Image (cartoon, rainbow, N blue to C red):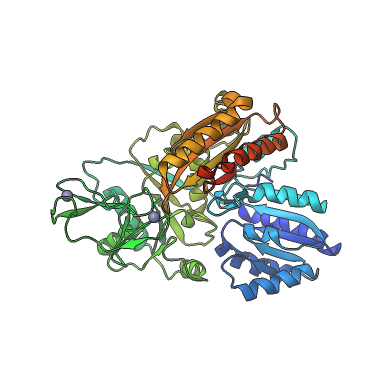
Amino acid sequence: LHGATASGKTHIYASIIQDIILQNGQVLYLVPEIALTTQLVKRLSILFGNVSVYHSKFNPAERIETWLHVASGKANIIIGARSALFLPFTNLKLIILDEEHDSSFKQSETNPKYHARNVAQYLAHLHSSKVLLGSATPSFDSYFLAKKGKIGLVTLQERYFENEKPEIKLIKLDSKTLPPHGMSDALLDNINLQLKEKKQSILFYHRRAFAPYIVCTQCEWVPYCKHCDIALNYHKWSNDLKCHICGYKQNIPKKCPACANTYIIQKGIGTERIEEDTQIIFPEATIARMDQDTTRQKNSHEKILAKLEEGELDILVGTQMVTKGIDTNNVNLVAVLNTDVLFHFSDFRAKERAMQLLLQVMGRAGRRNQRGVVVLQAYNIHNEYIKSLDNFDFKELFDKEIIERNLFNYPPFSKLIIIQLKHKELEVVEEAALSMAAGLKEKYKDAILGPAEPHISKVKNLFLRDIMVKINPNTYHIDLIKEDIFIVAKKITQYEKYRQVSIVYDVDPY
Ligand SMILES: [Zn+2]
Ligand SMILES: [Zn+2]
């Protein structure tokens, strides 16, 4: 369901749910962010009465309750995050994945690594039920399947925006004049204007913490995590340095351990810094921040959203979270502080994701009877993608991108699997990865890439090496590939030396 407005889609979902309830079937309704369940539960409860909710922020007792309720067949509508896919359904008839393009549907941190979209399809196959994917900006994988006729496609022929499209203001950044907080004078003027008119603003930045790292001004020493190959982030509120991968913390050194210089400065910015500086610039404004650090506790995310919706906030600063599911009347300005960086992430989906994000952002500004403003700060204002936002056409973007994917044999034209090997000794993991790659190359030749050192090459004291399998699923059956990979892996780990090497698989890694 390639559907313009949020309300239009929800209306369709509701009418399909109605049919299934009448047949006594179960409906699983998946959302990418658990904070978004609150609004949805309210809406669906009014229509259908009892709605069950399931996600990882519930405590075990609450989860067991829902689990039993689903197992007994008494739960008809279950709203949840991706983990709800593993509930014991008895009569599942429909799985809805709303905002199906959202990368939160991919579990990429713990094992097993899976994509909710794939698991939903398999679960539906087991239950002979249906899957409904909904999005205003479909993932290219789903859209590709739809265009090939492998899955159905319904397009809501309305305009993308509920009302008038927001006005886009593109502001060119100049690193020489940009203040350390990353907000240009033009952006500050725009925020000020909203404050005067008692309207709300949302400021989006892709990174949390106060500063991504600190550095010695004399010898350029940067503190790294003891356990991972990554610089420690500076958090001002807790006044410490933290690893965003393993959670390791340490105090801020009073002097550089390398050269004893006492002048150590912060580099770069994060949402914490932006929040603080915005408060200094606009002392009268009520400001909140929404990122992983402020939403750790149960309901904290909902509380911030409620404050925004009730008009208690003037400015909300945040990471990706602020681009999702905010549905209030009064947000008039949405600003992206660094637009360029969205296009520079180093995987092949960067452009697809950047455009999805920017379109979501545009949808947040000025809903219902008022024309909002979207401020995009960028160093390269000639980026053709950013320029195309004004007269955006999803099909055009898709057609252009898909040619490039085909040219470089990226999904949906190929299947990617990352095999990651981990060991506490670098030499051991390097050797094991080399033999594993060699073993696979015997049969799969050029489809095996690497081993390579991943971007972050050490995590929690283990050294990492990646082997990438990039394969055309029409040439080899995916089950056969899986079998071969396991055979090779088993051979390697049979050697005493490699016994402790752990091997992790990530299918559709991006
Ligand atoms: Zn130093
Ligand atoms: Zn770490």
Left or right of 13? Residue 60 is: left
| Callout count | 0
Asked whether the viewer can see residue 391, the reply is: no
**Where 423 sits versus 296, above or below?**
above
Left or right of 255? Residue 245 is: right
Q: Nearer the viewer, residue 111 or 39?
A: 111
Residue at horizontal 69 percent and vertical 58 percent from the top: 85
Q: Nearer the viewer, residue 163 or 344?
A: 344
Q: Nearer the viewer, residue 111 or 127?
A: 111
Left or right of 327? Residue 29 is: right
Residue at horizontal 55 percent and vertical 45 percent from the top: 503
Residue at horizontal 59 percent and vertical 56 percent from the top: 32
State the residue lying farthest toward the right. Answer: 23
Residue at horizontal 64 percent and vertical 51 percent from the top: 116
The quadrant of the rendering that contains the C terminus is top right
Q: Quadrant of ligand 2?
A: bottom left
Pinpoint residue 110: horizontal percent, then vertical percent: 55, 54
Q: Nearer the viewer, residue 270 or 415?
A: 415
Pinpoint residue 496: horizontal percent, then vertical percent: 54, 44
Q: Quadrant of residue 315?
A: bottom left
Pinpoint residue 474: horizontal percent, then vertical percent: 71, 28
State the residue lying farthest toward the front. Answer: 496
Pinpoint residue 333: horizontal percent, then vertical percent: 42, 54
**Where 329 sits versus 163, above or below?**
below
Asked whether the viewer can see residue 105, the reply is: yes
